[in-house]
Image (cartoon, rainbow, N blue to C red):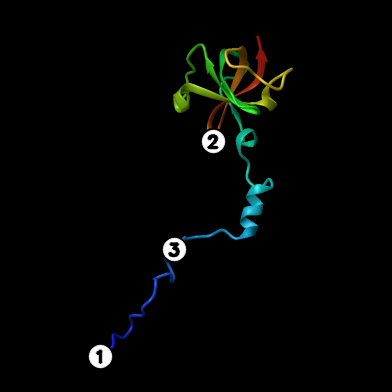
Amino acid sequence: KGKKGKAKGKGKGKGKGWGYMMDPWDWSYMMWGGMPSGPNLPREKVISGSSIIGEVFEWKDTYGWLKATSSIDHPQAGKRDGKIYVSKKDINGATVLEKGQKVSFTVYEDPSGLGAENVQIL
């Protein structure tokens, strides 16, 4: 006698496979300016008015990482091994940085961690 309720097949029915797939409209929203990211995240100043001295740890064409020469007293200061994000739009008087350059900057906090703005090459 046959088994009722059990269909043979590869089991690609409901609840299996790729899971939730975004439709093309969701992708277009994210690709063309929908959600802020990187230098466009909302910012909050960490230490107002005082500049910090640091060094360019790494530069990748449009963004990079700085290391402060003195410690920063902030809960997120240890995130990313103490590196501070910098975008080329936050550099004053230049568009690129080179590894090892000395810089001064002010620190902000965003949902990703600490970042540098008002960056000046020394």
Counting from the top left corner in percent of width and height, residue 20 is at 50, 60
- Which quadrant, please, contains the N terminus? bottom left
Residue designated by label 1? 1
Residue at image point 44% right, 63% down: 17
Q: Which amino acid type corresponds to the residue marked 3 in the rendered image?
A: Gly
Among all residues in the image, which is located at the extreme left? 1
Q: Nearer the viewer, mark 2 or mark 1?
A: 1
Q: Is residue 97 above or below residue 38?
A: above
| Residue at the disc numbered 2 | 111
Discs 2, 3 touching: Cβ within 8 Å: no
Which residue type does callout 1 highlight? Lys
Could you tell me which residue is drawn at 56 percent across and 14 percent down?
Answer: 55
Marks 2 and 3 sit apart, C-alpha to C-alpha, by: 33 Å
Mark 3 sits on what residue?
Answer: 17
| Residue ID at (42%, 65%) | 16
Q: Quadrant of the C terminus?
A: top right
First along the sequence among labels 2 and 3: 3
Crowd tier of the residue under label 1, counting other residues whose Cα lies within 10 Å: few below 14, some 14–19, many 20 or above: few
